[in-house]
Image (cartoon, rainbow, N blue to C red):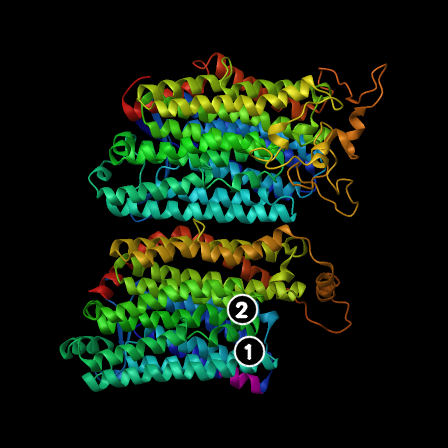
Amino acid sequence: MTEVDSLRPLVAVLLSAAAIVPILLSGDRPNLREAWTLLVAVTGLGVVASMVPGVLKGTVYVTDLGTFVPGVEFALRADPLGILFALLASLLWLVTSFYSIGYMRGLSEHSQTRYFAAFAGSISAAVGVAFASNLLVLFVFYELLTVATYPLVAHDETDEARAAGRKYLAYTFGGGVAVLAGAILVFWTTGTTAFTPGGIAALASADPEVARAAFGLLVAGFGVKAALMPLHSWLPDAMVAPTPVSGLLHAVAVVKSGVFGIARVVLDVYGPDLTAGLGVGIALAAVATFTLVVASVIALRQDNLKRRLAFSTVSQLSYIVLGLAVLGPWSLVGGLLHIPAHAFMKLTLFFCAGAIHVETHTDDISNMAGIGRRMPLTMVAFGVASLGMAGIPLVAGFVSKYFLLIGTISAGDVVFTAALLVSGILNIAYFWPVVYTAFFESPGAADEKPVVENPLGGWVGELDVASTGTQTSTRVPIEGTSAPADIERDDHGYAPTHEGQGAVDESEAAAHIDREHGDDTSPAWEHRRWNGEESTWFMLGPILFAMAGSIVLGIVPDSAVFLQIVRLIVENVTGVAV
Amino acid sequence: MSDLPALLVVVPLLGSVTVMLAGLARSKTGWPIAVGTCLVQTVVGVALTVRAFGDQPIRYVVGGFTAPFGIELVIDGLSATMAVLVAVVALGVLGYARVAGPRSNPFYATYLLLVAGLSGMSITGDVFNMYVFLEITGLAAYALVASGDSGRSARAALKYLLVGTIGASLFLLGIGFAYVATGTLNMTDLSAQLAEVGYASPLVQASFGLLVVGLFVKIAVFPVHTWQPSAYSGAPDSVSALISALVSTIAAYALIRIIFTVFTVEFLLTNAFAQNVLVAGAIVSIVLGSVIAVAQQEIKRMLAYSSVSQFGLVVGAIAIANETALTGAVIHLVGHAIMKGGLFLTSGLVANATGARAVDDYRGLAERFPTGAVTFGVLALAMVGVPPAIGFVGKWYIALGAVEAGSWPLAVVILGSTLLTLAYFTRIIERMFFREPVADTASGATTNGAPLVTDGEGTDAEPPLVSAGMQATVLLAAVLAVVLGVAAFEYGQVLEPTIERLLS
């Protein structure tokens, strides 16, 4: 590995931060403002991508800004692991920027300037996390990421959004404190916090108790953003944010900064050998396994689409953590490859949920019966991404899960293999109903959804005939959904009282329903053709791009650059070519 | 050149007298003279700083009476830092006070007197002389707090006077005990003689206890902080900023001086109890200060309790007594002065612009008064310790020091203080940016804010409530809070010989 002094890592970090100023200044000229976002997103992606060939050849680009605190350099290093995350974040930021334009304008959102400025700041911090050269610099950007994303979580300025924002700050700053404490312990025992592939050597000779404590603190701190149970509860609440935020930040940049932090700790601070030697890897794997199974079960019962996706995210993030914690080269490849794989798939899913919300104000799955007629392309993309999530071949999720399964089996941990398979089945169980209801049901004739509608664990005692009578396929509109005129808010399809309850209530969505067409008098979604008239291309384009990305990663993973980077990372750390 | 150290005290004293006399001839001459004085003070301070960071401190004998008998001024890196801090903050607050007032000449005379007292405390090498400057500082501060025109200011000043005097008296008693034990008042001499008397001697221990408790009162460590919230919230905004940034800071500096230059680390090692008292004071201050701050409705009271908590960090660092922690203490003293002074000025600016003084009035401030909201937000986040702002660097050093010394309870509290600080600042940040202004409070606010827009109608000859100088000052504070964080490492390096000497 050769190190090259270069300003490119610094430029990649600062570009999007620098965009905040022109974005704020051109707040009253939306087209100019969005032009800045797109310009910087393209340039930033170019800068990051320009480093990829070099990194694949073993070059590490370094910007050294001098000493930060004694013994700790403030340096940015574009090594393979960093470039993996940075490339992913800047590529998907560009995609999401287009989508944001369609989404925010489609809903005529307030405070769009603040939104785009905070988005640029978040990406800057995320790239900073990627290129951080040691724990302390990572901590700096980790904290800045929290600050930059807070305005996006609280964007709605409703009570729910503020509560979610408070919870978000409390959880993530709490995590930040744990990371700082862990970094201090590592610094105290070894005199350095710099990332070294294979681990910091001095840590191996340190007091094992201290080393374990530091590992626990670091992983708990990063685990907050990685939504490891029981530290996950901020994530479903943060879904109150606009959908592009849920998509890019709460499925890609923010949550993966947590996962990325764990990857740095396991691979570059402790190293696989020491992690295994201290016995902390197996503990982390157990937590991840618990999370990935339990979150899948919880997702089964979420009727709100974004909430279901959120719990799916919680579950899928733990795939990555599990892959890292099992420590074998195959599972490492699987876990790391799942970072881009999950990003493309989950971004597709969130984009679809957002497009449905913008176009029809439908947010609950029980109201989506027959929506495939209204939004054919969107729902096809949703279907493809769902299959990928479940690990069906030809989509990205299969490849990474394949590596994970091989990795857990070859490490001899059959329990983890079983958990992965169970979770795969649960993935189908909670995604398939969405696809099924969209294409094979209609608003008038939908099946019952016993898992979602009935109380957990089934009825206890005698059946109440009156209440079961209402639990039919036609949902009774929730009270208050006739949208009192004085409540002016848009909640991005999250809150219990959200404005659109889909086809059956009196809100906007009803406008999309044909009550009479020909002989058939049952209500059905109006038909839109497959040429994009269902929405704007600002939203459809990103959806199809993200979907295409997950297919490319699934069909030709070796020519997609991500797998090459992942192989390189694992080879550097373990010395084994996978 | 050789008389420079004395100038640090003489310049503001002369300035103070000049302002007083000039006021007899012409009113409204106070501000320009005060600015000139503070400028000269800054220049002198910087000139001394250049030389002070060497291996040996600058020593200056007042009036030709040599060291153990006469009064000596000693300027090392630490004193120089404090002297420059005093001068710069005083100058900055003047930039704010020109329009915000109070504008009378006696005010500026007292203001410069306070600067003289603080500078004197920073550079003196004699404990009794330090007491004299402590009293000058105290008296000037009482008078400044009382310069507000409400009854509340007067009451707050009275409370400050009573509690502050008790603190100063305890300090004086402590000096008395030390004098009885050794027969000298010069710090360096005292340090040597106390060691001879023996650190286990009850006389020495009593002296230490009295000095420390006296300074605790001045720093406002919980539970002897009671004067501080009412003084900060009762005083005019410029005064709150000045005293919150400087008075407790210099008292904390005095604590460092007394503990490390006079009593030395060996004393702490011999008397574990003394160290325990410091640790306890720190922990209680950090936790309770923050908790009470969360419960406050008035912005300035909340900021005041925040100071109680932040000085807990500094006292904690002093208790840890190693090089890393002390560097952190000094950085945090400087950082806190900038951040807290800036926050008080911003709160004053917001009050002038919109009439908002309570936490709930800050709703929707980002739309009504973006400058204030953004500045407050940046300073608050810096205070929470979001890197790379100065608040983070201080905390890093102190926490690392705590871990190095193995004092785990303190380490946990120091790291946890981030969350405690966050607890009280989140309330405000959330209200400023993510709430709509409430109609009934907004009506009061808009009537107050009206002169802003239709300035100079000549109806009431009201001065503009928000001047460029005021805005520039708070923006400068916010920028400094971030920029100093980047420069803090260099500073820590430069400070190293000074800290080493303190600990030897």
For label 1, the residue is B30
For label 2, the residue is B301
Disc 2 residue crowd, few under 14, some 14–19, many 20+, Cα 10 Å: many
Q: How many marks?
A: 2
Is label 1 in a helix, a strand or a loop? Answer: helix
Q: Main secondary structure of the magenta part?
A: helix
Task: Report whether mark 2 lies on the same chain as mark 1.
Answer: yes
Highlighted range, magenta: B18-24
Residue A498 lies left or right of residue B276; in this view the side is right
Q: Residue at x 40, y 72 (%)?
A: B219
Q: Classify B496 as above or below A476.
A: below
Q: Quadrant of the N terminus of chain A?
A: top left
Q: Position of residue A289 (x, y in %)?
A: 41, 30
Q: Position of residue B170 (x, y in %)?
A: 34, 83
In primary-sequence order, the first of circles 2 and 1 is: 1
Q: Position of residue A492 (x, y in %)?
A: 66, 37
Q: Quadrant of the C terminus of chain A?
A: top left
Is label 2 in a helix, a strand or a loop? Answer: helix
- Magenta stretch: residue A50 in it? no
Residue A562 seen in the current view = yes
Label 2 resides on the chain identified as B
Rendered image quadrant of residue A574: top left
Tell me the CA gap for discs 2 and 1.
29 Å
Residue B346 lies left or right of residue B128; in this view the side is right
Which residue occupies the foreground of this view, A145 or B17? A145
Which label belongs to residue A74?
none
Kindly identify the amino acid type of the residue bearing the numbered disc 2: Arg
Q: Classify B252 as above or below B428.
A: below
Q: Choose mark 2 or mark 1, whichever is in front.
A: 2
